[in-house]
Image (spheres, helix red, strand yellow):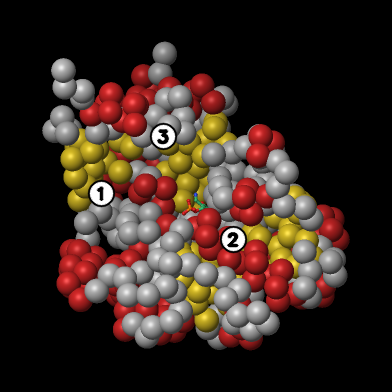
């Protein structure tokens, strides 16, 4: 008897949740995902802030096709000179402050976190890493060690020693950053806690404390980067410059790639005493980087970060309903907070049934996540908002 795809999925694919979404995908284009039953779904989450230029963008497809015909993989990271990597590095660094001049390419956000943790420890000869309550920087063991939520960590202890979690926007906690601290990891706009925005010049004060103690400031822009919050990178909005910048997600336009970026003198840590301080086989894969270059060109040429500001304005204007407790939004990254997890989950389910893909936040399951592709039209955005508001009104 033939086994169907749902059964195959449950039988052979490692599961991470007792209730997976189980949408059977046919293809995706622009802001739409098409399932194998012929239904069309409006994508309001971009695969968790990945598809910022939309699905199957023609520039991305063209770049990938051209590169795969030339070569995909030649040698492990850092040995050969490859044009796609150089072109990308030149363009990306032209948009960054002068101290963010040296890029280490990896394959994912978690790897960017891991690499940056090692870099900070190696460069400062210190071991303590500080992060924030309800922060997510990845799921590998180093990144897990600095996760700001105990629930997902306990089973996997012992994790790294010398980590400390402090509270965001709490100035008194800045005194925990000392001459023993190698690095502080922070998202300038915090995502998985259900969107939190710094207040009262908090990030400037954090940067000053890091400077005073010789601690490296690491900005995790894996989720906020590439125009999502209204500027190419979120840190630009807060008059700070990180010592290390982490990138991932939207960077590759759907292909796996990440990066951590720093000053040449800091990055030198990996090439001396001993060399090979960090290694990767696929980091900076030529096809992924070619795709990333097409993404960066598309975002900057079309100024898609400005689209994020228009999306913010519309979300703020339109998202009003008696069942909504609060809306927190920065650019095209938005959390709708409800009184309870139950209201959120039931609303999300109704949205799914009505062709709108939304979900919740890892550490805020009473908040609905909205992070549409930046190329979404105003009409499509409005249609998605209407589906949410109708779902709320129809909630029994
Ligand atoms: N940092 C942040 C802020 C993230 O949102 C994520 C992914 N949700 C990561 C790191 C980890 O990235 P990846 O899943 O690509 O390893």
* Dot 3 alpha-carbon crowd within 10 angstroms: few under 14, some 14 to 19, many 20 or more: few
- Upstream in sequence: badge 2 or badge 1: 1
Residue at screen point 22% across, 60% down: 57
Q: Residue 180 carries which label?
A: none
Q: Is the residue under label 3 in contact with that under label 2 (CB below 8 Å)?
A: no
Expressed as whole percent of the image width and height from the top left, the position of residue 104 reads: 50, 74
Q: What element carries label 3?
A: loop
Q: Dividing the image into 4 quarters, which one contains the N terminus?
A: top left
Q: Residue at x 58, y 66 (%)?
A: 115
Q: Name the residue under label 3.
A: 14
Residue 216 image position (x, y, % from top left): 70, 71
- Residue placed under numbered mark 2 in the picture: 114
Q: 107 or 198, which lies in front?
A: 107
Label located before the other in sequence (3 or 1): 3
Left or right position of 212 against 394: right
Mark toward the viewer: 3 or 1: 3
Task: Give the x, y percent position of residue 223.
Answer: 48, 56
Whether residue 177 is visible here, answered yes or no, is yes
Q: Does the residue labelled 2 lie within 8 Å of ligand 1?
A: no
Q: Which residue carries the number 1 mark?
A: 31
């Amino acid at each position: 008897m033939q086994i169907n795809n749902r059964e195959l999925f449950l039988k052979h694919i490692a599961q991470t949740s007792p209730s997976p979404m189980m949408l059977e995908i046919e293809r995706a284009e622009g802001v739409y995902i098409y399932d194998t039953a012929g239904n069309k779904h409006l994508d309001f989450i971009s695969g968790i802030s990945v598809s910022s230029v939309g699905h199957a963008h023609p520039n991305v497809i063209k770049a990938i096709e051209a590169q795969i015909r030339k070569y995909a993989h030649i040698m492990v990271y850092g040995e050969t000179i490859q044009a796609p990597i150089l072109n990308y590095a030149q363009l990306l660094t032209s948009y960054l402050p002068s101290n963010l001049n040296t890029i280490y390419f990896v394959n994912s956000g978690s790897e960017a976190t891991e690499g940056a943790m090692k870099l900070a420890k190696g460069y400062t000869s210190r071991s303590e890493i500080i992060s924030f309550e309800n922060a997510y920087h990845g799921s590998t063991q180093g990144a897990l060690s600095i996760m700001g939520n105990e629930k997902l960590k306990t089973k996997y202890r012992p994790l790294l020693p010398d980590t400390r979690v402090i509270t965001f926007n709490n100035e008194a906690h800045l005194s925990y950053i000392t001459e023993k601290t190698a690095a502080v990891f922070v998202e300038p706009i915090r995502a998985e806690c259900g969107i939190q925005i710094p207040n009262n010049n908090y990030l400037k004060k954090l940067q000053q404390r890091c400077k005073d103690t010789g601690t490296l400031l690491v900005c995790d822009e894996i989720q906020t980067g590439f125009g999502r919050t209204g500027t190419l990178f979120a840190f630009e909005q807060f008059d700070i410059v990180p010592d290390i910048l982490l990138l991932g997600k939207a960077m590759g336009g759907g292909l796996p790639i990440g990066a951590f970026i720093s000053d040449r003198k800091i990055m030198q840590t990996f090439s001396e005493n001993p060399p090979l301080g960090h290694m990767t086989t696929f980091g900076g894969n030529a096809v992924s980087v070619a795709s990333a270059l097409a993404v960066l060109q598309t975002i900057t040429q079309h100024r898609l970060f400005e689209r994020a500001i228009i999306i913010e304005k519309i979300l703020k204007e339109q998202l009003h309903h008696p069942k909504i407790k609060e809306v927190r939004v920065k650019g095209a990254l938005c959390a709708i907070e409800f009184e309870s997890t139950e209201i959120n989950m039931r609303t999300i389910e109704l949205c799914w049934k009505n062709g709108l893909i939304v979900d919740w936040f890892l550490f805020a399951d009473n908040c609905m996540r909205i992070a549409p592709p930046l190329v979404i039209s105003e009409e499509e955005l409005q249609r998605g908002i209407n589906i949410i508001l109708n779902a709320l009104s129809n909630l029994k």
